[in-house]
Amino acid sequence: MPKIDAQYSYNFIDLFAGAGGLSEGFLQAGFKPVAHVEMNEFAAKTLETRSAYYYLKGTDNLGLYKKYVSGKISRDDFMKQIPASITKTIINETMSDETLPAIFKTIDGIMKIRGITKIDVIVGGPPCQAYSLVGRAQSSHMEVPMEEDPRNYLYKLYARFLKRYQPRMFVFENVTGIESANGGATWKNIQKYLKRVGYEIECREQNAHTFGVLQNRRRMIIVGWLKKSGLKYPDFLEIKTDAIVNDLFADLPKLHPGESSDKYAKTKATSYVTESGIRTKDDVLTHHNCRPNIDRDIKIYRRAVELWNDGHKRLNYNDLPDELKTHKNRHSFTDRFKVVEGDESCCHTILAHLSKDGHYFIHPDIDQNRSITVREAARIQSFPDSYFFEGPRTSQFVQIGNAVPPMMAKGIAIGIFEQLYKGDSDGR
């Protein structure tokens, strides 16, 4: 990767930012954030906390951050010590035709104060439930039919940002189902809108696993660049690793349902965890707390792990004894109890559904016999241990499940950087 120096330090705006998975990858690759726009209150607070982390890291004052995440000082006392110039870059607002003028004004103000004359990259992906295949399978139970879901049209707001700020490149991330949503009409309209505001675009399916993430997570990554700019869709570097999913858990203390811990296990962290930057010597363990489980679920979890350990067999809900069955639906979602594939190179996709229950993400260690913790889910998504998620546990799971894995985002960011760098170098 080319050396990132002051002359080639690029900035970005993050739309529909969520908990900041995309931003984290771009930050790790050396990009500078101008603003994050996010509607959810807890996710926006997570973004504020992460921005505070980077500010304190830059001022060699991470001791204050550790005090906060360890619960030694309140969030109010913590945030009072963070300059407003840092926290005001997080815009907690729902994007709409009505709110966009005020959002633009805020971003313009940030740019003026910081002397920024142009935006290099815009990143983000509108909420994907309206495009997802799973969402469509459940649409018969929704109050608003899938084809009438207003989230189908959030790409138009994304295009408004492109038209106003004309970044040299953009990254639009979404689920693989985006191509077939509404019979393909939505995908055609997205392409039309993005091209109309001055961009050439290309869309490729990417899997987080090829970026070194220990998870099978397929996403559509649309990259756009200004017409006649000579830029193109990057060829992302594939990262190969011999690690298995259990390597993510080795240094985390063993817990049972309802238990929690804020101290790492004495077991040494694996090379994957340390070399990837997921854990550093300065980290404090947070979010490692288990849901309590009723006896029935614990019995089902044990059966599921036993089957997995016996030749990677999966539990079918219909095969449970009647006393353990509570769901009337015996035809769909029969794999609703699923073990995380600890002895394989990647596990199934982490979902926001983790906020409802942990049945689809059972810890592979039969002795622990529980669902995964927030920290374990975050590690599967490749979030660093220094990443602190605000809000109740349900919100933390949603934030993690909806995020782009930072390791994947960093790979994308490096590819974008190389395109911009090459364009600048050729233009000198």
Image (cartoon, helix red, strand yellow):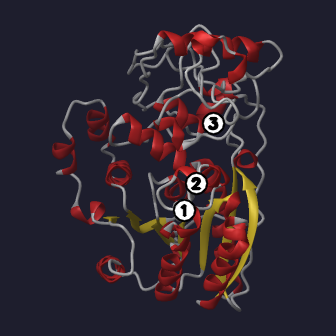
Residue 183 x/y as whole percent: 72, 70
The answer to whether residue 263 shows anywhere in this view is yes
Marks 1 and 2 in Cβ contact (< 8 Å)? yes
Q: CA distance from mark 3 to mark 2?
A: 42 Å
Q: Which mark is residue 139?
A: 2
Rendered-image quadrant of the N terminus: bottom right
Q: 348 left or right of 269?
A: right
Give the residue displayed 34% in from the left and 43% down from the top. Answer: 390
Q: Which mark is residue 307?
A: none
Of labels 1 and 3, earlier in sequence is 1
Residue 56 x/y as whole percent: 32, 49
Residue 35 x/y as whole percent: 39, 68
Give the residue displayed 75% in from the left and 60% down from the top. Answer: 205
| Disc 2 secondary structure class | helix
Q: Which residue is mark 3?
A: 275
Q: 260 left or right of 236?
A: left
Q: Amino acid at mark 3?
A: Glu
Q: Nearer the viewer, residue 66 or 23?
A: 23
Residue 65 drawn above or below residue 38: above
How would you rate the neighbour count of disc 2 (Cα within 10 Å): few for under 14, some for 14-19, many for 20 or more? Answer: some
Q: 385 left or right of 275?
A: left
Rendered-image quadrant of the C terminus: bottom right
Q: CA distance from mark 1 to mark 3?
A: 46 Å
Q: Which residue is mark 1?
A: 145
Q: Nearer the viewer, residue 126 or 121?
A: 126
Q: Amino acid at mark 1?
A: Pro
